[in-house]
Amino acid sequence: MENINTGLKVQSKRKGKASSNPKYGFWLVVLGAALWGVDPLFRVILLNNLTSSQIVLLEHVIISLIAIPVIWKNRQELKQVGWRQVGALLFISWGGSGIATILFTMGLSSGNLNAVLLLQKLQPLFAILLASLLLKEKLPRHFGYLMLFALAGTYLLTFGFAIPIGHWSDFVQMGSLLSLGAAALWGGSTVMGRLMVGQMKVETVTSLRFVLALPLLGLITLNEGAGWNLPEFGTSAFALVSLNLIGQALLPGLLSLLVYYKGLTTTKASVATLAELSFPTAGVLINWVVFNEVVTSAQILGFLMIWIVLFIISRQSDSVAKAGTLG
């Protein structure tokens, strides 16, 4: 569920009429982002039987069964990887794919589902800040003011219109903090992914992201010491848990990334930002229908404030790219 749109161009070889059609790409971005929104449908149900780290470990095991053959096929690329690329890959896999997903899963179990979901739209802002620090990229115009506006939206998503006065626990919303941690790590993964541009194919990096996270996730799960509360093998309950695990890994996990990347190759950043509204829309709708989580007016306002900031930044990025092309 890593949202990678920070206003950056994604280049690929365009083949066929459909793949070069911007309208076709727009709807692929809509579909890919909407698949991220169904994540809580699987993950929250799995939390009834498994811990956050157990869920993420099993999810990575399932995806790795598909990823390992891809790595083997493209194994020649691994021979040209330097220590800088190794560091980037470890951050992407351990931070973005492993720890961030655990934090997000924990957030769903300890906070307002809609707030945890909507706060993920802050990820591009973390990516822009880290790109400025690590890659020396120029910040968007008026970024300081835009960041303050987005932080005000974050406050509304977390606390609503209330002023949290009293105990520290009234101020610190654990679910929201976990979600912000996940968004920061996913944003960092975007920056590390940029370091890999031109070094490896997208499918190789994506596959390594899941496979390299397995040792860390195994240690985290082992150190946790929690029992595996799986239903008895062969029962309908076991089949339900298994189907949810597979669905979680393949739909909002692997398939969403493949569809999203494909659509982004022919979709402008500002248009993709609009298309990605399908992500929180699908998530909030599922939370309402399945988990009886009703979005509040403060959450709607807060989300709109964050989205306006992202849209302005995306428009700036498109203008810079267009000027560079004309020049």
Image: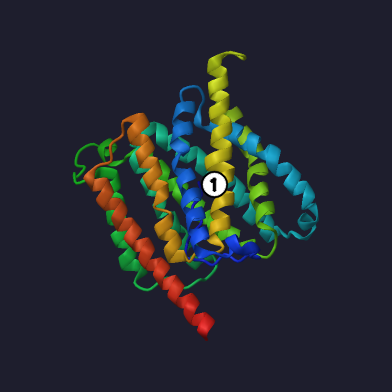
On the image, the x and y values in percent for residue 144 come to 34, 67
Q: Quadrant of residue 192?
A: bottom right
On the image, the x and y values in percent for residue 260 come to 54, 53
Q: Residues within 10 Å of mark 1 (few under 14, many from 20)?
A: many
Instruction: Left or right? Give the position of 253 relative to 164.
Output: right
Residue 220 in view? no
Instruction: Left or right? Give the position of 19 relative to 168.
Output: right
In this view, the residue in front, 199 or 240, is 240
SS at mark 1? helix
- Which residue extends farthest front? 17
Q: Residue at x 59, y 35 (%)?
A: 59
Q: Is residue 195 above or below residue 174?
A: below
Q: Is residue 133 above or below residue 55?
A: below
Q: Tell me the amino acid under the disc marked 1.
A: Ser
Q: Residue at x 40, y 70 (%)?
A: 315
On the image, the x and y values in percent for residue 131 come to 51, 64
Q: How many marks?
A: 1
Q: Is residue 207 above or below residue 199?
A: above
In this view, the residue in front, 35 or 310, is 35
Q: Residue at x 67, y 44 (%)?
A: 212
Residue 10 in view? yes
Residue at the disc numbered 1: 256
In this view, the residue in front, 27 or 40, is 27
On the image, the x and y values in percent for residue 51 come to 50, 27
Q: Residue at x 61, y 63 (%)?
A: 17
Tell me how the rendering is colored.
Answer: rainbow
